[in-house]
Amino acid sequence: MILVTGGAGFIGSGFLYFLQRVTADEVVVVDNLTYAGKEEYIPKTSQFHFEYCDIGDGERVDEIFKKYQPKKVFNFAAESHVDNSIKDVNPFIKTNITGTCNLLKASVDCDVHKFHHVSTDEVYGSLEYGESQLFNEETPYDPRNPYSASKAAAEHMVKTWHNTYGLPYLITSAANNYGPRQHKEKLVPKVIDNALNNRVTYMYGGGQQIRDWIHVDDHCDAIWTLDQQNIINDKFNIASGHEFPNIVITKKILDLLDKPHTLIGVSNDRPGQDQRYGTDFSKLSKTTGWFPKIDFDKGLQETVEFYKY
């Protein structure tokens, strides 16, 4: 039995559809259906069993683990929007830190064979625009906003549960994801939605921040590749090497929708704004042979088409 947390969210639901293609194993899906998750995103087949659960509720987590006795856990559940974390950090502490600890404790109690924690490259902080050295797995943690700090804390908890209780683990830190079923608070679906409704997208500092973009299907493929090769007790970065300034992504989307660039506005920079994320995934490629498969422009076009209907 596989347990997937956050399966009604963007990346978590993408992983469920990926599992549907590659395994017949039964999957219990745990989610509390916040604003960013929808039960309709969970595949409606007998392979998937949905359990409503806030992972910040330790008793409910224990109840589900005892009921299903999962042997693999994939933890996608997280509060993930930086702006929200700046306004109120408490939900990020409850879900990303306390919730992760609840899952770890239950995993030890149920003798889970592997706890795969899905993290972010934002734990490393920010690169300078012209910097040649990318984030790698040895880069010191330097989170610059409450969201990334909560994710860094969760990673430390995962390793601590391995060191203290012997829980087999894997941590993956991924670049910016894009693809279907992403909430409109994120850049790609926000720009698409605004453009379809002829609204201006206001970009922090003019949108010069650079991000590495990976399609959610490539991300899920990397996670499953690590699983199938039975790699545990390690950390890997997952990225694509497709680095673009946010303004370039925005213009690409407007061009795909045949909308004018006048639908781009400028807003003041927010606190804790990172200049650039650039992530080295060579360790993953050398260890497993994995490489991203989806061409960025093609993936972006397919994503735009998804949100049009």
Image: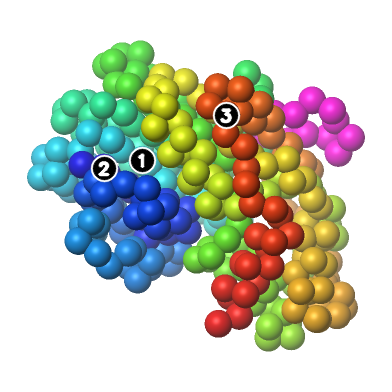
**Residue 131, percent from left and from top:** 85, 30
Q: Which residues are magenta?
A: 123-135
**Residue 25, percent from left and from top:** 24, 46
Residue 82 visible, this orientation: no
Picture layout, residue 30 above or below residue 309: above
In the rendered structure, are the residues bearing label 2 and label 1 in contact, judged by CB atoms less than 8 Å apart? Answer: yes
* Nearer to me, 308 or 110: 308
Cα separation, mark 3 vs mark 2, equals: 24 Å
Q: Magenta span: helix, strand or loop, mainly?
A: loop
N-terminal of the pair, mark 3 or mark 2, is 2
Say which residue label 2 marks: 2
Say which residue label 3 marks: 289
Kind of residue indicated by mark 1: Phe
Quarter occupied by the N terminus: top left
The residue that appears at 38% across and 25% down in the rendered structure is 230
Kind of residue indicated by mark 2: Ile
- SS of the residue at dot 3? loop
Number of the label disc, if any, that sits on residue 74: 1
* Quarter of the figure with residue 70: top left
**Residue 203, percent from left and from top:** 78, 63
Outermost residue, bottom side:
197
